[in-house]
Amino acid sequence: MALELGCSTILYGGHTLNAALQRISKIGYTSVELCSIGGMAPHLDPDALSAEVVGIRASLAQNGLAIESIGASGRIGDADQFKRLLDIGAALGAPAISTGPPGKADDEDDFKHAVEYVSALGEYAKSVGVKISIKPHVGSSVYSTPTATRFMGEVDGDAIGLNWDASHIWRTDAEEDPVASVKALAPHIATLRIRDTLGREKPIGAVANQIPGGGALPLADIAAAMRDVPQTDRAVVEIVGTKDMSLDDVDDVAQRTYDGLAPYFDS
């Protein structure tokens, strides 16, 4: 199936949303993950007034960008705040809200809590028509293909899906094959993330190693496997570590990433 390349506003976390949208569009990306991530990319305030939301929707349209999701990493612990972001997502036409799971890895109580807590939020998400997309994340209660499979077996798949990121699957202790992972999890994946990474150590590493070609991921094979994910036709670039860079330097990262990935995606 067709698969277009989007970009998370987290790359432009140290700059305004308007600057991010203009540059992301100019480079050639067709959609964005609109971030509401305190300290990293505060582009969307959970307490935004309706007029602000209308303005954001207009800015997305002016730049020819679809909203792939609301990026809400770190927000899930505050249920009321998370629900406000779900409401904003619905108003913006976002099909999903992406976040990490609560709890730490390999702790049964934390895993059970994650299932119960996210399921409760899922009921609200379902009522407003925005799917919660949980990232299997290094160090978290859901972090691998097996834990993601188990998690999805215990939640409502109509309300909750997975935010699949090859770079996190690559860094599991089991050193998983990301191509096999995306194929196994495809029925549950709501949103897709892509970047490169060099080592299998837990920290993601330098920005240079997240740009395609700077790492060790089989990106062409991963992109090909992503095409068989039925619930989305977008894969979004998510690179961290750029917050303190100048606009020109972030543009360079975003452009080089686009150039490296574009051959594998549709425009």
Image (cartoon, rainbow, N blue to C red):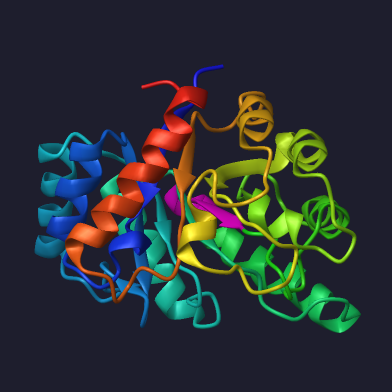
Question: Residue, x 68% and y 66% (percent of image)?
Answer: 137
Q: Is residue 220 left or right of residue 200?
A: left
* Residue 24 x %, y %: 25, 45
Question: Residue, x 67% and y 45% (percent of image)?
Answer: 217
Question: Residue, x 32% and y 73% (percent of image)?
Answer: 243
Depth check, front residue: 39 or 161: 39
Magenta segment includes 131: yes
Depth check, front residue: 91 or 215: 215
- In the rendered image of this protein, does residue 82 appear above or below residue 30? below
* Residue 177 x %, y %: 82, 45
Bounds of the magenta span?
Answer: 125-134
- In the rendered image of this protein, does residue 209 appear above or below residue 228? below
> In this figure, what is the number of numbered marks?
0
Question: Residue, x 82% and y 37% (percent of image)?
Answer: 180
Q: Quadrant of the C terminus?
A: top left
Q: Is residue 239 left or right of residue 35?
A: right
Magenta segment includes 49: no
- In the rendered image of this protein, does residue 149 appear above or below residue 48? above
Q: Quadrant of the N terminus?
A: top right
* Residue 219 x %, y %: 62, 37
Which residue of the protein is positioned furthest toward the top in this rendering? 1
